Image (cartoon, grey):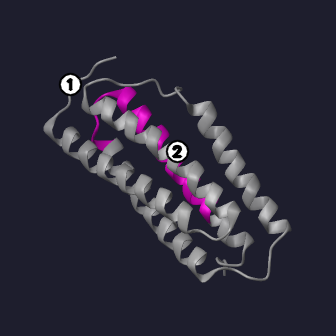
Amino acid sequence: MSISLSNKERTLLEDQKTHEQLCIEKYTNYSSQAKDPQLKQLFQNNANQEKEHLNSINSLLSGQVPSVNSGSQQNTAQSQASNSAASAGAQAQSGMVSENDSELCKDMLMTEKYVSGAYDTTIFEFRDTNARNLLNHIQKEEQQHGESIYNYMASKGMYNVQ
């Protein structure tokens, strides 16, 4: 399905494209820096989803609305795998947490909060319902990334809810 973008929609998508590129870069770099293999895998899974998001944003910028369902089963499976890994970590929590891993998690959780908020604004500014649905789907996955990081941090004692 093709759409014509307003200047504002195009500008917002360009911002989201930049955010997705930054997320890919951070997750990829942080995956190689993380000490815990579980965290490495979580970051790599999220990086893979961010690449799909970038492809969707690029499609929108070219005037095409990709199907919301494309890749969503894979994304759900990746998200569930990340959450399962975090749950497994809670059961086998080690007493030693890398300070580096903690800092990487804090940075990525903050990044995901920002990116999700930016999608909220973008969604409200779009005229096309199918594009809004796609952007809403991406935002939901960004929130799932944040949840997987939060679950990992909570399982390792890095994030204490008071």
- Percent across and percent down for residue 155 are 74, 70
Q: Quadrant of the N terminus?
A: top left
- Percent across and percent down for residue 126 are 29, 36
Q: Verify whether residue 60 appears in magenta.
A: no
89 over 129 or under it: above or below: below
Picture residue at 17% right of the left edge, 42% below the top? 8
Q: Main secondary structure of the magenta part?
A: helix
- Per the image, the residue denoted by label 2 is 48
First to last magenta residue range: 124-149
Give the residue type that dot 1 points to. Ser
- Per the image, the residue denoted by label 1 is 4
Query: What distance separates the C-alpha of mark 1 from that of mark 2?
Result: 28 Å
Q: Quadrant of the C terminus?
A: bottom right
Q: What element does badge 2 sit on? A: helix
- Tag on residue 124? none
Q: Residue furthest front?
A: 32
Q: Quadrant of residue 3?
A: top left
Query: Dot 1: few (<14), some (14–19), or many (≥20) neighbours within 10 Å?
Result: some
Residue 14 in view, yes or no: yes
Give the residue type that dot 2 points to. Asn
